[in-house]
Image (cartoon, rainbow, N blue to C red):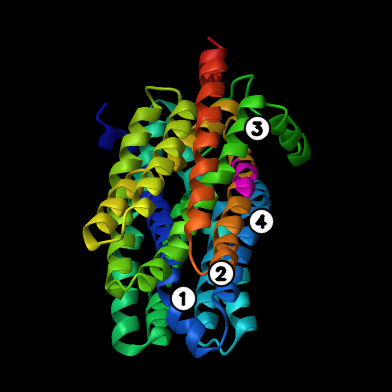
Amino acid sequence: MPLLQLLRPTLPILIGASVMLSLSMGLRQSLGIFLQPLTHDVAISVSDFTLAIAVQNLAWGFLQPLAGAFTVRYGFRAIMMAGALFYIAGLALMAGAQGFISVMLGAGVLIGMSLACTAAAIAMSVAARAVPATVRSTVLGMVSAAGSLGALLSAPLGQILNEGYGWRIGLIGFVILSLALLPAAWFAGRVDKIPLPPRSHDDIADTTAAVAVQVAFGNASFVVMTSAYFVCGMQLVFITTHLPSYLAICGMDPMLSAETLGVIGGFNVLGSLFFGWAGERWNKLALLGGIYIARSLVLAWYFILPPSEATTLVFGAMMGFLWLGVGPLVAGAVAELFGLQWQAMIQGLAFMSHQLGSFLGAYGGGLIYDQLGSYNLAWRIGVAVGLAAGIVQVAFALIRPTRPPLAATA
């Protein structure tokens, strides 16, 4: 059966999840555009701003398992709609910021709470439940790809408004964009009406959240994947938070940072589609390790060279291809290991590690810059730990591959 015909009954759900993911990730990834003008106008330091982004990532990570567990009790729609309201409120508070507290509450706490309810773990869980297992990895790649388009719109729009009218108007533009989260979450919430498929004996179902957590952390493949996910968060948030500042220090055109974030979003579409497709054919965890190794090599190549418009855009393209391709691979691996009922919560547990890395990438990068006046030590650390995590992930995946539940029952 053609893929489109197979997916037609659930297209409103998949489109809603894609739009929700696109906006929540695209707006978040573009906040670094406002770092320089906002910190100057409200008299806070770069490390103050990056501390707010770091807190955002911690709130997102630590609340993600809770949001996933709540979907089992209250349904996806209620959680996603609440997250959309948190996002709108957080951006509005940032737009009216007068000091550190309002930046911390808006960019840090509220947007962090929102992302736990609207970003990858929830959107991927919605998509995984809405489609048959035979096409799940491909569809997860499609949703992740669609979710990449937000940066293509929000980064250039934010920079244009920022340069033409000031950073407050730029953030008001983001508030207007974020209103679309509400209908997107509503349509994605139709997934609550879809019953769970028949489960295999490997699935975690009809049990408590505590037991599901215990089973997840008793699985060695999950523990290794979760540990390597820490490095993923550290590398990506370092780039989104500090690349605009790095380019400004190097005297590059301010629009280049927005263009590069847009290129990352565009090539992320291709990467997400590719890794979603590849995840149905090859070992998902080995592919994850390959992504971490490749990212580290690209990061080293870019920062060793003197920055230019050409190398920066090529860097954005290569890094974009390797960006959210982890999404369908992690979501697919969790579904294979543990089934669908507790997928959002268990994927959220892995994401806690990712967000601890994000905290280090955002705040640690800011501290290193404030102390040393450059990002040299920060990117070198990112390359070293990325290579180490990728090699360990690939080696373990090849030694101990996962078994999909359906295969295990055959």
Residue 223, disc: 3
* Residue at mark 4: 63
What's drawn in magenta, residue-wise?
347-353
Q: What is the distance, in whole Å, between disc 3 and disc 1 at their CAs?
A: 35 Å
Q: Residues within 10 Å of mark 2 (few under 14, many from 20)?
A: many
* Residue at mark 2: 50
Do residues under tags 4 and 2 come within 8 Å of each other at their CB atoms?
A: no
Name the element at disc 4.
helix
Sooner in the amino-acid sequence: mark 3 or mark 1: 1
Do residues under tags 1 and 2 come within 8 Å of each other at their CB atoms?
A: yes
Residue 308 percent across, percent down from the top left: 25, 61
Toward the viewer: 231 or 162? 231
Three-letter amino acid code at the position of disc 4: Leu
Q: Residues within 10 Å of mark 3 (few under 14, many from 20)?
A: some
Which of pointers 3 and 2 indicates the residue nearer the eye? 2
Sooner in the amino-acid sequence: mark 4 or mark 1: 1
Sooner in the amino-acid sequence: mark 3 or mark 2: 2
Kindly indicate the quadrant of the structure image that contains residue 402.
top right
